[in-house]
Image (cartoon, rainbow, N blue to C red):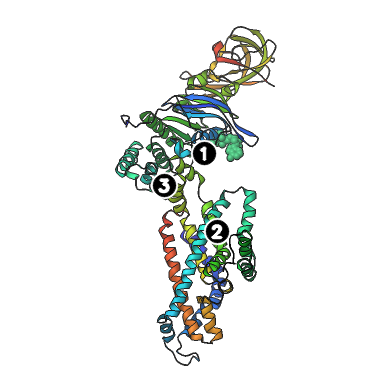
Amino acid sequence: MAASTNIATTYGLRLAAPLAIFYAAFFLAPLLILFYVSLHVDPEMTRFGFTQYAKFLFDPFSLAVLGHTMWIGVEVTLLCLVLGLPLAWLYVRAPSWAQSTLMLVILLPLLTSVVVRTFSWIVILGRQGIVNTTLASLGLIDAPLKLLYTEAGMVVALAQVQMPLMVLPLITALSKLDPSLLDASSALGAGEWRTFRKVILPLTLPGIVAGCLLTYAAAITAFITQTLVGGGQMLFMPMYIYQQATTLSNWPFAAAISIIFLGAVLVALSLFSLLGRLSKGYAHA
Amino acid sequence: MIADPQLRTAQALRIDGVSHRFGANKALDNVTFDVHGGELVALLGPSGCGKTTLLRAIGGFIAQSEGQISIGGAVVDHLPPNKRAVGIVFQNYALFPHMTAAQNIAYGLEARGTAKAATTARVDEMLALVKLQNLAGRYPKELSGGQQQRIALARALAVRPAVLLLDEPFAALDKNLRLDMQIEIKRIQRLARTTTLIVTHDQEEALSMADRVAVFNQGRLEQFATPSMVYDAPAALFVNTFVGAANVLHGTIRTLDVDFVTLTLDGAGEICGRMLQPVSIGAHAVVCIRPEHLQRTASGLAATIELGLPLGSTIVYEARLANGVAVKISEPREAGAEPLSPGTPIHLAPKGPRLATVFPHHA
Ligand SMILES: Nc1ncnc2c1ncn2[C@@H]1O[C@H](COP(=O)(O)OP(=O)(O)OP(=O)(O)O)[C@@H](O)[C@H]1O
Ligand SMILES: [Mg+2]
């Protein structure tokens, strides 16, 4: 038994080697370089020091950008969860011929280019866009609403783009749910809401956590959608880093805020997965 | 427990002309029967005959295409499962994997808004009933199949259902555990006086546990009677061959009496039997005789022994009639007796005319 386990492990490690090398060369090494760059005091990178970090952490404007970015992620994740859960439920309950169509619809955001998707949202949300012209022709509004370049518009666009990342893990979790558990709950006198809260929710929590992790991480780093649909008025971390690096050529500061952003994201994600670990006890169902 | 004033057990169940179609396929065909309060009824039948469909209709998980179901005299067709007071134990138990045994049992009580103290007391009572007090804190995956099943039973009984439905509850258990659980369920069911329907493939199980047996075939109820009646006086050819072993012989009706007919077997002689459905002289018919109801006699159907199997207290013979049809005979074995050797000529007759049943044959 022990011998065979050993063999399996050796093979496993050897097979993983190409991936490990890839990660080391294109992920770990750049990260180390980034960290090295961030430790410089001046943009010309002549002296070492932690001043870049101090500059960010004591600057209310920078902290606000970080906070706003993290908050946008929460909003997008919640919206995806609220819309994604019924969608995933619909998929799991649909007859198989409808499932393939639904899956195509669910995956569509992943199959279109980010730029095309984002420009579609500009068309939809613009002053003369689909939403405004529809509302106007229905007589519901007199003047076009400002939808584009608003936080709400951007959250909706981000949610659409990230939706598959939420829905796919949810579908996996829901289809693992034994339908007889729902029948059992009902036969024991529980209404639908109670069954949802006491049976469906706890048993699909690992899937929900996975979906939230993916959506959150993708939403706060979605540079193109944030920039194009959000417009110039709102500044988020990816754009902030980009500006510092390319427009202002302040590489050490850009590197430092990248590291800080990375740290903040890691903290947020560990909070999520802590939730997941709490539910691990019964994730096997 | 029996003194409980709120006891809603011992409620009669009435199935009235219930049919159910899945598309073109008729899973239930005009099924009607009455179950008395506190009775244990076994639903017996081959795979796909509609047993689960009937349970699901009673539980409210599907709405039958036609007919009515009433519990305790009240029609329940419009009620969702959570309003029907029907307890169900699924074939796979369907225990909530994220809850302990005790939490599983408490689930239905909490859903009904039972006070905490009363819930705890009832959970303890149910754990004692299924003799699993020491496993209250275990999760389902930490329980054996038999223990899971007892928890599932306790969970269904905790809310005092008017009717308890068990869908092949013993399918996953080995033979010893199965017997233990059959006795256990029977004991619990007696004690709680819960009207119970138990689905099974296993005829021994049905005959030994049930007060009455409902035999199904292709969605139709073929017979609904006590186990002895089903065995001794089968109402249909299907029941006769499905429940217990039976020799089926083909022939033509020669004489007709009030209840009895004489049948000429194709090239093997004559036999007298009890007639259940009207037949006419000259009609084709089949006669069923159980192996233990055939005896060796001086006269009767001529046959030749092919094989004799001494099975402890009985000997089972396989013999061939003059027309080449094989029949089985089972007779008690005296101490020291050896079976007749193959090739021995014998004569066979039913032990009594009531023990051979004649059914019309629809070719
Ligand atoms: N959801 C369904 N859709 C279509 N047909 C179904 C469905 N459920 C059952 N059937 C059909 O209805 C008939 C009765 O099925 P049912 O499950 O009641 O049989 P059963 O007596 O419980 O069989 P088993 O002993 O194998 O469990 C079968 O022919 C089955 O194929
Ligand atoms: Mg079944």
Q: Give the residue number, with chain letter if any, for mark 3.
A: B140
The reply to the same-chain question for discs 3 and 2 is no
Q: CA distance from mark 1 to mark 3?
A: 24 Å
The alpha-carbon separation of the residues under discs 2 and 1 comes to 28 Å
Residue identifier under label 2: A167
Label located before the other in sequence (1 or 3) = 1
- Dot 2 falls on a residue whose secondary structure is helix
Q: Amino acid at mark 2?
A: Val
Residue nearest the viewer, comparing A125 with B191:
A125
Q: Name the element at disc 1.
A: loop
Q: Quadrant of ligand 1?
A: top right
Closer to us: mark 1 or mark 3? 1
Q: Is residue B160 left or right of residue B362?
A: left
Task: Give how far across and how far down residue A268 sits, in percent.
Answer: 44, 68
Say whether mark 1 and mark 2 are on the same chain.
Answer: no
Q: Nearer the viewer, residue A93 or B132?
A: A93
Query: Can you give x and y, in whole percent of width and height, for residue B88 in the image?
Result: 46, 37
Instruction: Say which chain tag 1 marks.
Output: B
What amino acid type should be assigned to the residue bearing mark 3? Pro
User: Closest to the observer: B286 or A36?
Assistant: A36
How far apart marks 3 and 2 lie (CA) works out to 29 Å
Read off the residue under disc 1: B61
Residue B157, placed above or below residue B234: below
* Front tag of 3 and 2: 2
Residue positioned 42% across, 42% down in the render: B148
